[in-house]
Amino acid sequence: MRIVGLSGGIASGKSTVSNLFKSHGIPVVDADVIARKGSGGWKKVVAAFGEEILLENGEVNRPMLGQIVFSDPDKRQFLDRLLAPHISSGIFWEVVKLWLKGYKVIVLDVPLLFEAKIDKFTKPIIVVWIDPETQKKRLMGRDKSNEEDAGNRINAQMPLDVKRNKADIVIDNTGSLDDLKEQFQKVLIEVSKPLTGTQFWHSRNGALVILASLTSGLVLCIKALS
Ligand SMILES: CC(C)(COP(=O)(O)OP(=O)(O)OC[C@H]1O[C@@H](n2cnc3c(N)ncnc32)[C@H](O)[C@@H]1O)[C@@H](O)C(=O)NCCC(=O)NCCS
Ligand SMILES: Nc1ncnc2c1ncn2[C@@H]1O[C@H](COP(=O)(O)OP(=O)(O)OP(=O)(O)O)[C@@H](O)[C@H]1O
């Protein structure tokens, strides 16, 4: 199985690229662990930040929690530590489900792929890059936020240029959506190439071949001994 890593900076265009993968039939696992009411991550967030962080329907008020953690680095690190095990196990089980379904290529959309050291499990690693000015503009436009708030969120992450240097494939999303789609076509060809030997043996079909070989080997041994 090929596990492609997808990362980038805030508002650099990861979700837009994710949607392109999905529209081409490639499943995307994302790291959203606190959304579901009653989940382990949700319970920890409520215990740590209080019920005032909840909306009337019991879901986490994400803009409110974002406001709290992005204006206080200690609280953000605390939230990260709280959620890290849930993020890892959530991703792991989603990958297992897709493996069982026989998918050969899947994408992990993880904003903090490098920070959380999940990059070592993914190949290739795609980073959606954008120039800093356009990033701030798009972030402020999308979230209707001011410059200070946008700056806090951008500064909470590893600099995008550092992420770019760690990438196998860089998508530059500074231009138009058509530019992005053009680059995406090349990326799609790259990630859809035949699996390498290791990736094949790590896929469900590879595991079935191993199982079938072991079973027939065992049967032959038993026959030879009887
Ligand atoms: C802070 C929260 C409530 C904000 O929720 P909201 O719906 O407003 O934003 P969303 O989840 O879509 O995140 C938007 C972007 O913010 C950035 N971001 C999110 N969390 C963090 C963080 N802890 N540190 C740095 N950047 C972050 C990412 O680029 C992300 O793509 C939420 O992101 C959260 O719970 N974050 C902590 C855990 C987490 O999901 N970490 C990122 C996954 S590895
Ligand atoms: N090439 C583009 N041209 C113009 N707008 C774009 C382009 N790509 C993305 N956008 C817009 O920029 C904003 C950020 O994009 P998107 O939500 O995909 O980023 P993201 O990296 O997933 O963000 P986050 O880190 O906050 O989850 C959105 O409003 C999106 O519609």
Image (cartoon, rainbow, N blue to C red):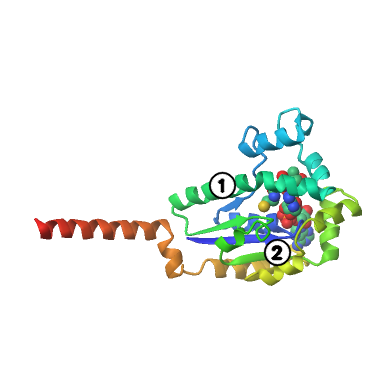
The three-letter code of the residue at mark 2 reads: Val
Q: Which residue is mark 2?
A: 128
Q: Residue furthest left?
A: 226
Instruction: Report helix, strand or loop for mark 1.
Output: helix
Q: Which residue is most to the top?
A: 56
Q: How many marks?
A: 2
At mark 2, the secondary structure is: strand
From what the image shows, is residue 133 above or below residue 44? below
Lower sequence index among marks 2 and 1: 1
The answer to whether 165 appears left or right of 203 in the picture is right
Label 2, ligand 2: CB separation under 8 Å: yes
Residue at figure coordinates x 85%, y 48% from the top left: 71
Frontmost of labels 2 and 1 is 1
| Quarter of the image where the C terminus is located | bottom left
Q: Residue 89 bears which disc, if any?
A: 1
Q: In the image, what residue occupies the spot 85% across and 54% down? A: 152
